[in-house]
């Protein structure tokens, strides 16, 4: 019976897992009306909600505190004030219950949660806020086959959203806005299995500032361009490793169009596509 705690960035979450089964998984996220995450403000959010979420999780899981055998905390990477807030809370509980405190790497957790889908030996397309990597397990280790050379795809989308005056997180809003758009050609930047976003972001910022384009067209074209880059890199990794499964992970994996593109690519090359449910794609305990 393990208590999980997540606090690396925007989200504070607590969960209870018994023998690999999720009994409860509750979170509360820091959001903004406009502008991005202010780390100190996000940390204040976490300290404000932590006790309440902990109580709700115990009730929802139907267990008492004394059943907990270990406390797992996502200890890195993340925003320093948020990490500290989570660690403080996790230490308090572990000390009170006299159970071990187990550090968990946040990125590995984003990948490992995908095992719940039944994927056995996939190429992983890891698309979260600060990270974008194409990873596969080879010779007993996770190996990075390709990655972003600058921004993480989620941070790219959220920055584009900020230029449009959308609050944080912008990804889910852009997912909807893009459905009504038409295609405008944008720069395309992929080298082997590595990708770069910053030039495309500058181009989009200039296009927004020119006032000549509709935001739905920009949103649609942005998604079509960068998701094809991700899917192209993932397909190359499938071809290179000879693996037959693709597993999407990280919060951007919630995007309906990215999921659709992955599904089409996998169908065309007779690979299987796996994607965890949304609540397990975004940050969670
Ligand atoms: P990291 O795990 O790299 O440290 P993170 O913890 O911020 O980053 P997640 O919580 O996995 O990442 O994902 C958050 C990101 O997911 C945000 O950038 C958000 O905009 C994006 N996102 C969520 N839903 C969607 C969607 N439907 N379409 C596109 N992006 C989305
Ligand atoms: Fe994350």
Image (cartoon, rainbow, N blue to C red):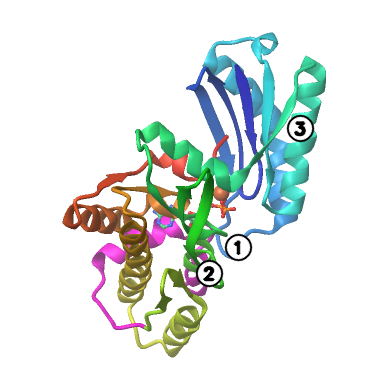
Within 10 Å of disc 2 (Cα), the crowding (few <14, some 14-19, many 20+) is: many
Query: Contact (CB < 8 A) between labels 2 and 1?
Result: yes
The answer to which image quadrant residue 224 occupies is bottom left
Q: Tell which circle, 3 or 2, labels the residue nearer the N-terminal end.
A: 3
- Name the one closer to the observer, 144 or 240: 240
Residue 283, can we see it?
no
Q: Position of residue 278 (x, y in %)?
A: 40, 42
Residue placed at 42% from the left, 77% from the top?
191
State yes or no: Cβ of the residue under disc 3 lies below 8 Å from any atom of ligand 1: no
Quarter residue 92 falls in = top right
Find residue 159 and name its label: 2
- In what element is the residue under mark 3? helix
Magenta segment: 158-186
The tag on residue 89 is 3
Identify the residue position indicated by label 1 in the image.
36
Q: Dividing the image into 4 quarters, which one contains the C terminus? A: top right
- Judging depth in this view, the residue of 21 and 37 nearest the camera is 21
Query: Of marks 2 and 1, which one's residue comes earlier in the chain?
Result: 1
Q: Secondary structure at mark 1?
A: loop
Q: Position of residue 187 (x, y in %)?
A: 38, 83
Dot 1 or dot 3, earlier in sequence: 1
The residue shown at (35%, 59%) is: 175
């Amino acid at each position: 019976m393990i208590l999980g705690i997540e606090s690396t960035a925007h989200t504070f979450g607590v969960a209870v897992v018994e023998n690999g089964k999720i009994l409860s998984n509750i979170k509360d996220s820091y959001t903004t009306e406009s502008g991005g995450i202010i780390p100190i403000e996000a940390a204040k959010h976490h300290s404000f909600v932590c006790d309440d979420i902990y109580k709700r999780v115990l009730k929802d899981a139907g267990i008492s505190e004394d059943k907990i055998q270990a406390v797992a905390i996502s200890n890195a990477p993340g925003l320093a004030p948020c990490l500290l807030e989570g660690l403080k809370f996790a230490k308090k509980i572990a000390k009170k219950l006299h159970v071990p405190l187990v550090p968990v790497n946040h990125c590995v957790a984003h990948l490992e949660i995908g095992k719940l889908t039944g994927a056995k030996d996939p190429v992983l397309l890891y698309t979260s806020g600060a990270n974008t990597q194409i990873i596969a397990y080879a010779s007993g280790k996770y190996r990075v086959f390709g990655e972003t050379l600058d921004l993480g795809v989620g941070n790219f989308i959220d920055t584009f959203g900020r230029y449009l005056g959308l609050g944080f997180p912008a990804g889910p809003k852009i997912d909807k806005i893009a459905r009504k758009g038409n295609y405008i050609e944008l720069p395309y930047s992929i080298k082997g299995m590595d990708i770069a976003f910053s030039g495309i972001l500058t181009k989009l910022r200039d296009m927004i500032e020119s006032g000549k384009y509709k935001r739905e067209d920009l949103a649609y074209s942005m998604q079509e361009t960068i998701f094809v880059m991700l899917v192209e890199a993932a397909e190359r990794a499938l071809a290179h490793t000879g693996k037959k499964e693709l597993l999407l992970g990280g919060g951007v994996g919630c995007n309906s169009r990215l999921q659709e593109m992955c599904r089409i690519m996998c169908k065309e090359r007779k690979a299987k596509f796996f994607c965890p449910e949304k609540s397990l794609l975004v940050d969670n305990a």
